[in-house]
Image (tube, rainbow, N blue to C red):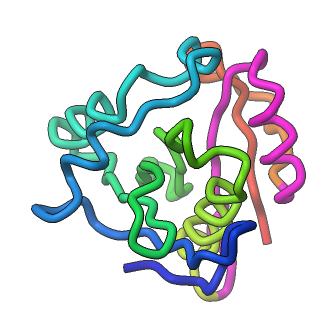
Amino acid sequence: MLDSGHTDRLGRRVTLRPVDDDNWRAVADLAPRDDQRGWVPALAARYLVLTSRSEVWTSLAVHADETVAGHVMWGVDDDGSRWIGGMLIDAAEQGRGVGRAAVRTLAAWLGGPDGGHPVRLSYHPDNTAAARLYASLGFTPTGAVEDDELVVELRR
């Protein structure tokens, strides 16, 4: 479990946990808002399938206290950069700071104890909410584009 002590706006502690026998169904059923389906799948189940068939990505369940509120995955690229991908916060949990706390927790862990590893992620250029969130957390554009998404990076 990854726990950096971050809380959402309701005061719930946000932790990242392995997807396991206890939470996988709740993770698979997570769904974004309808207006976000151009950027993320209709259900987090797609991310679970992707990580089960990939040697690069690992899924984590985002918990707000004991409620499964989202999904995020991480991976390490050939150049040693750490990547955050496949984040989906359930529509009912959005606007509460769960995604912010999840990204802060995962980025701190992926960056390493000395913060020496760059942490990257990508988002669709039309996803202005994601752009605002990541910029507010210190992610800056790299100039690269992956699968029509803008790549940003956090360096400590």
Would you identify the image quadrant in which residue 121 lies?
Answer: top right
Q: Quadrant of the C terminus?
A: bottom right
Instruction: Note whether 43 is above or below 118 in the view shown.
Output: above
Expressed as whole percent of the image width and height from the top left, the position of residue 152 reads 75, 41
Instruction: Note whether 125 is above or below 79 in the view shown.
Output: above
Expressed as whole percent of the image width and height from the top left, the position of residue 86 reads 47, 39
Expressed as whole percent of the image width and height from the top left, the position of residue 38 reads 57, 12
Please give the range of residues in magenta.
Answer: 114-138
Instruction: Note whether 74 is above or below 145 in the view shown.
Output: below
- Please state the total of marks drawn on the protein image: 0
Q: Is residue 58 left or right of residue 2?
A: left
Magenta stretch containing residue 115, yes or no?
A: yes
- Residue at screen point 68% across, 77% down: 11
Instruction: Note whether 35 is above or below 100 in the view shown.
Output: above
Q: Is residue 87 left or right of residue 43?
A: right
Q: Is residue 101 left or right of residue 141?
A: left
- Residue at screen point 59% across, 23% down: 146
- Residue at screen point 41% across, 64% down: 67
